[in-house]
Image: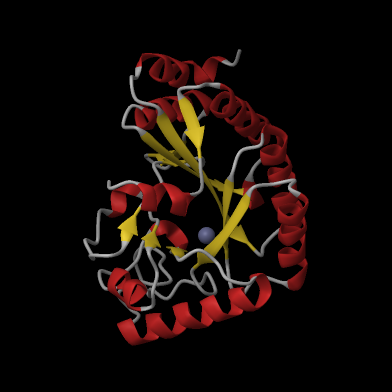
Amino acid sequence: MTGWLDPLRTVLAEREEPVRFFFRDDDAGWHDEALEELLDVFELHEVPVDVAAIPVAMTARTATLIAARQSSGRNDITVHQHGFAHVNHEPEGRKCEFGASRSPEQQRDDIARGRDELSALLGDLPAVFTPPWNRCAPWTAQVLHDLGFAVLSRDLSAGRAEVPGLVELPITVDWFAKRKRIPVDRAGRGQLLADSAAQGTVGVMLHHAVISTEDRADVGALLALVAGDPAASADHLDRLALSTTF
Ligand SMILES: [Zn+2]
């Protein structure tokens, strides 16, 4: 038993409704070896994972390793679009690729080009978009809807865009969350998971490029709990988003 997960165990034991989880790993295209190491953990526990891929950074090598894992059944992976080039366009303030400095037309061009580049490597993808740094301009949601996207996933703190036809399913637990600029420790992460589970849906965001060996072991412990506890279930982001009204 791992103590840091006890608050989550308690919530799972006490809630009458099941708790639904999804796991988003960001920045595919960077650090293939670290991506594979994290995918190995998901393979071991047979838990679905949503990989957020950066169109400009994706290579044939990354696409091949993902496709091989999908076709062999090693992993239940769904890939979706994560921005375009993962660059910051804001001259000041918080980093953002699709922020106020980019007009709707510029954003539309970047998102459409990114979708084309990813599709060329990976085929048709679910109509899901996650913006780098988990935030975007007030008009980005409408741009996405006009392009045919059905799901937007940001951080819970980003609020809701309220664009009819575009479902939002936010991340609720950032594995690398900070509180007053200090990284949340293991116990704090366990509490975040428990607090989120109490609301019914837990969206966990991971970054394979910066995850430590110890973190990977902790992710494994969480996945084992989710896979083994009948009060918990895991599915892909788009399936959860489109199966329920939030
Ligand atoms: Zn990112």
**Residue closest to the eye, 162 or 16:** 16
Q: Is residue 223 left or right of residue 19?
A: right
Residue 103 in view in this figure:
no
Position of residue 224 in the picture relative to residue 165 (left or right): right
Q: Nearer the viewer, residue 101 or 172?
A: 172
Q: Residue at x 58, y 23 (%)?
A: 228
Snapshot colouring: secondary structure
Residue 147 found in image quarter:
bottom left
Relative height, residue 88 to residue 224 (above, below): below
Q: Position of residue 92 (x, y in %)?
A: 35, 70
Would you say 18 lies left or right of 124 here?
A: left
Vertical position of residue 159 compared to residue 54: above or below: above
Frontmost residue, 172 versus 20: 20
Furthest-front residue in this view = 243
Q: Position of residue 206 (x, y in %)?
A: 55, 46
In the displayed structure, 128 sits above or below 48; it is below
- Left/right placement of residue 216 relative to residue 112 reads right
User: Residue 152's quadrant in the figure?
Assistant: bottom left
